[in-house]
Every structure is written in C-alpha cells, then in structure tokens.
Image: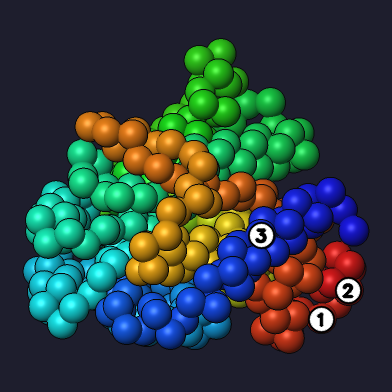
Amino acid sequence: MTKRRIALTAVIAAAALALTGFANTSANAAAKGFVGVILPDAASSNRWETADRPFLTAAFKAAGVTADIQNANGDKTAFQTIADQMLTKGAKVLIMVNLDSASAKAVQDKAKAQGVPTIDYDRLTLNGSESYYVSFDNTAVGVLQGTGIVNCLKAAKKTKARIVYLNGSPDDNNATLFKKGYDSVIRPYITSKAYTLVDDTAVPGWDNVKGGTIFEQQLTKAGGKLDAVVSANEGLGLAAVAVLKKNKLNGKVCVSGQDATVDGLRAILTGDLSNTVYKAIKAEANGAAALAVALLNGKKAATATGVTNNGTVNVPSVLLKPVGITKANVKVVIADGFQKRADVCKGIEALCKANGI
C-alpha cells in the first residue's frame, strides 16, 4: 500500500469514525429537526448526483438523521426558493454548494436570523455568514493540475510550449483558487518565455458546451498549434478533447482535469487527458454530515480544526487533501472504491492491465 493510499484511507476512516460517534444520538437528532442540503446543478459535473448525493444520503442514514437533499439545477432563484422552503419546514442546519456568493449569502443571512447554522460545502461563499466550511485545499488542487501539465510537457521533451487556460466559472471562488494554484506552477515558465500563454478565458457557469465553443476559439487563436490545455475540471477538459479529436490532435496535447469521473479516468488511460485530480468526495460528504449532526444535537463541532477567510471573517473549516492522478496511479481511485473497475475498463481492458488496474 502506498503512502498516498494510506493517507487517503486515513482521511476517510477519520470522517467515518466521526459519524459513528454521532450515531448514538440519532433519536434526539430526529426529534430536533432535519438537515437541508442544496446541491448546485447536475450539468457542470456529474459528481453532485452520482457521488455527493449518495454519500451524503448514506452518511445521514448511518447517523439516524433525516436529511432533505435537493438540487437547484443551476437556477439561483430556485436555490433561494429551496432554502426558504427548508427553513419553513423546520430545517435546523443547512448545507449548501453555492451557485454564486451573492445568492448564497442572502440564504445564509436569512438562516442566521432564524438561528440556523449553515455549512458551505465544497465552495466558499465570499463575505458570507456561513458557520462552517467543508472542502478540499483548492489551491492545492490547482497546483496538482499545473504540475501534471508541466510533467506532461517535460515527458514529451517540449522545452517550448504554447498553452491556454480554460478556467472555471468566474463567479465560483473555487475556480479562482484552482487558477491561483496552477498559475503559480506555470507562471514562472511563462515569465521565462519557455511557455507562451496564448489565451486565458473563464467558462461561465462551468458550462461544458460553452467550454467547447471557447476552446474552439482558443485553438483558432493559436493557429491550430497548441501543446497544453490547462483545464479546470474534466467536463471542460473533455470538451476540449472533443475539439482536439475533430482536428486529429487528441493525445498530442497535454490536457488537465479534475474530479476523477469514469470518463475522465478512461481519457487518462487512453492518453486524451494527461492528468486529473482525485478528491475523496466520500470523506468530504462524511465531514459535512458529521458537522451537521453535531450541530443538530447541540454538540461542539470539534472536527473543524482549520480556518478559511471568506473576505470578511475567518470561517472554521475542514480542509481535505487532493491527490494528483496520471496513468501511473488511476488504480488508486478504483482501489479506494470511488469508481468501479468495470466502468473504467469497459472496452479498454488491455490499457487497464498495462497500468496495473
């Protein structure tokens, strides 16, 4: 077992242990109300419905706590309506993944006025009134993305490279942190003139269709000559890959990702994506659920040992560690149970075996 795998397993085990500790108070929790969870959409990444929802559902079930999990489907008005309905029905804790900081802050302020604590899940609400924040070190995510791109270019023996940034949504603070991370790795190469940054564009709403259109424009701007696409997640990265395929350039251009989806891991193995980032969403879901259960039972949220400044105040935080993924360690994601081997390896069995999966 590698050190990286051991560390990852320890994080998940710790979160699970925290939940187990709260399970004994399930009867009291049920009597004190329920936990409301608002997910952002189902289009920017399939993780929200295929990973976060089931993991959160399982965590609350294990703790004997009632949870109402709904998805705003990218609609800020719907986001606020869902929150209002949850508060009216008696939610005692709200967990939310914001669509933008302004709309989430309005919900948080309303909840705070009613004495209901809020937990920012995955995305920090800037200048908000959130009680807690549970996520990954998102600057570190970006550092892993940038490092993967640099390593890919070095492996291809490219001392000079033309690159583009295909950034996440401009109103998502995580996208800002991802870019901060990968730019910190790549900027020195740009400054030294080793790399040329041909274009640097954000994709509104993490919209993959828009991302593909923007990348087509970037490729045109580059005259069809690119060496790397620094893409903020796999949805955007795979949108870029689709364009590269049309131009017979896939596998010849380094492309980053994030989320370790089935399609993303398959693209890593086929060489269409050079690198991605695995975030143990089960640990993130368990961490948020543990906090919510503690709050529901009037307990001190002892697991929030970190601090994140939201621009106005320092927010008690649970920050987990991401893992960079290339062909060499796709097996880590499967061994951890996040994705199934059968799904990742379907039709590419030889590639899986060649990479120890």
Of residues 61 and 263, the one drawn nearer to the viewer in this rendering: 61
Q: Amino acid at mark 3?
A: Ala
Q: In which quadrant of the rendered image does the C terminus lie?
A: bottom right
Residue at which label 2 appears:
353
Residue at which label 3 appears:
14
Of residues 14 and 323, the one drawn nearer to the viewer in this rendering: 14
**Residue visible at 73% across and 69% down in the picture:** 336
Residue 349, label in figure: 1
Q: In which quadrant of the rendered image does the N terminus lie?
A: bottom right
* Residue 89 x %, y %: 15, 82
Q: Is residue 102 visible?
A: yes
Is the C-beta separation of discs 1 and 2 under 8 Å? yes
Instruction: Give the CA distance from mark 1 to mark 2.
Output: 6 Å
Is the C-beta separation of discs 3 and 2 under 8 Å? no
Tag 3's secondary structure? helix
Tag 1's secondary structure? helix
Direction from residue 33 to residue 273 in the image, left or right: right
Q: Name above or below for residue 237 compared with residue 149.
A: below
Q: Earlier in the sequence, mark 3 or mark 2?
A: 3
Q: Amino acid at mark 2?
A: Lys
